[in-house]
Amino acid sequence: MFELFLLLIGLLGLWLGTEIIIKSALTIANYYQLSQVFIGLTILAVGTDLPEMVISINGSIQQLEGVYTSGVIFGNALGSCLSQLGLVLGVAGWFGYLSLTKSEIKQDGSVLIGSVVLLFLTAMDGVVSRTEGVILMLAYLIYYFSLLRREKVNAKIRKSVNGAIGYSLLLLLGGIVIVIVTSGLVVDNALALAERWQVKQSLVAIIIIGPGSSLPELALSVGAIMKKAAGLSVGNLIGSNIFDALMPVGIGAAISPLVVNQKLVYVEVSILFVLSFLVLLFFMCRKGLQKKESAALVAFYLLFIMYKLMGQ
């Protein structure tokens, strides 16, 4: 099973590159005194989701060359979203109390639900066209720039760049290079595994690549809670899900239209919608995520994985 070994090496490389990106981005963000939730929703969300993004770009380029990779691209985005809200948020909730303010639930929670609905609408006919890909990307960019305005970032980044920040910028670029290189390993060997096991690309993407590429979110979320920075944890996971529902599929389709199984859209995206709504319901009704709610999220995710394995 050399392909599985190389896939795991690729995922390890994605994790290492993302860790470098996160640490350097945090150094830059702290220097400019940006808030925890903002860092989580924007810098860390994008940083931890670079694996999904680069996998999507890599896969779409291969698709232009005649290799079908739509199942990997769409399945990876779905698998990441489901594992982040079910597994990662559920596990993180065991390490500490997680909460969101009413305004955060209203603003960011509504965007979370809206991103899943938009993903469903663009893919419901079985094809995500280039135009629909651009629409998904624009939806995320509008949200992102609204966050920048909310945080008043322009007024905070006028500090001069010192030596430490310059070094962090170099590390940031190095981490991006590692992510780009190892993403190729992930895509190539995921395709090889799907062919060897004679299973759908989406299954390999949802149960292996998705959770694997969510390892940075898991490490960051638990680490943030242990350091009494729960805002980073929740913000990162909510922001990551909004990003994953829109950008990987959006940029992938913009490069090469995606042809996806309609059952995958109607069933799995609907499950993601239910899970997203359940998470927000816990935050609204229980004033936060506690151990019982965390256990319910993990159980929901494990039941989904069982359903996928039994259905294959």
Image (cartoon, rainbow, N blue to C red):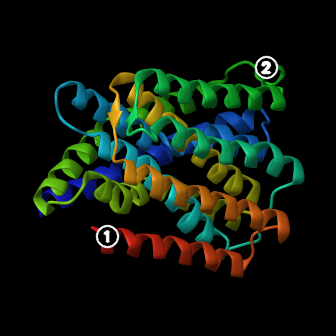
Local crowd at mark 2 within 10 Å, few (<14), some, or many (≥20)?
A: few
Residue 287 is at least partly visible in this image: no
Query: Along the line of sight, which residue is nearer the eye, 246 or 91?
Result: 246
**Residue plotted at (67% across, 56% down):** 233
Residue 154, position in %: x, y? 79, 20
Query: Along the line of sight, which residue is nearer the eye, 162 or 289?
Result: 289
Position of residue 103 relative to residue 137, above or below, is below
Residue 196, position in %: x, y? 11, 59
**Amino acid on which disc 2 is placed:** Asn
Q: CA distance from mark 2 to mark 1?
A: 50 Å
Residue 28 is at least partly visible in this image: yes
**Residue plotted at (36% across, 63% down):** 207
Residue 137, position in %: x, y? 54, 27
Say left or right for 175 vs 205: right
Local crowd at mark 1 within 10 Å, few (<14), some, or many (≥20)?
A: few
Residue pointed to by mark 2: 154
- The numbered mark at residue 311 is 1
Whichever of callouts 2 and 1 sits on the residue coming sooner in the sequence is: 2
Q: In the orientation shown, which residue stands out farthest toward the front?
A: 125
SS under mark 1: helix
Query: Along the line of sight, which residue is nearer the eye, 82 or 42?
Result: 82
**Amino acid on which disc 1 is placed:** Gly
Position of residue 26 relative to residue 63, above or below, is below
Count the numbered circles shown. 2
Position of residue 126 relative to residue 195, above or below, is above
- The numbered mark at residue 192 is none
SS under mark 2: helix
Query: Along the line of sight, which residue is nearer the eye, 190 or 115?
Result: 115
Quarter holding the N terminus is bottom left
Say left or right for 39 vs 101: left
Residue 179, position in %: x, y? 38, 39
Q: In the orientation shown, which residue stands out farthest toward the right?
A: 102
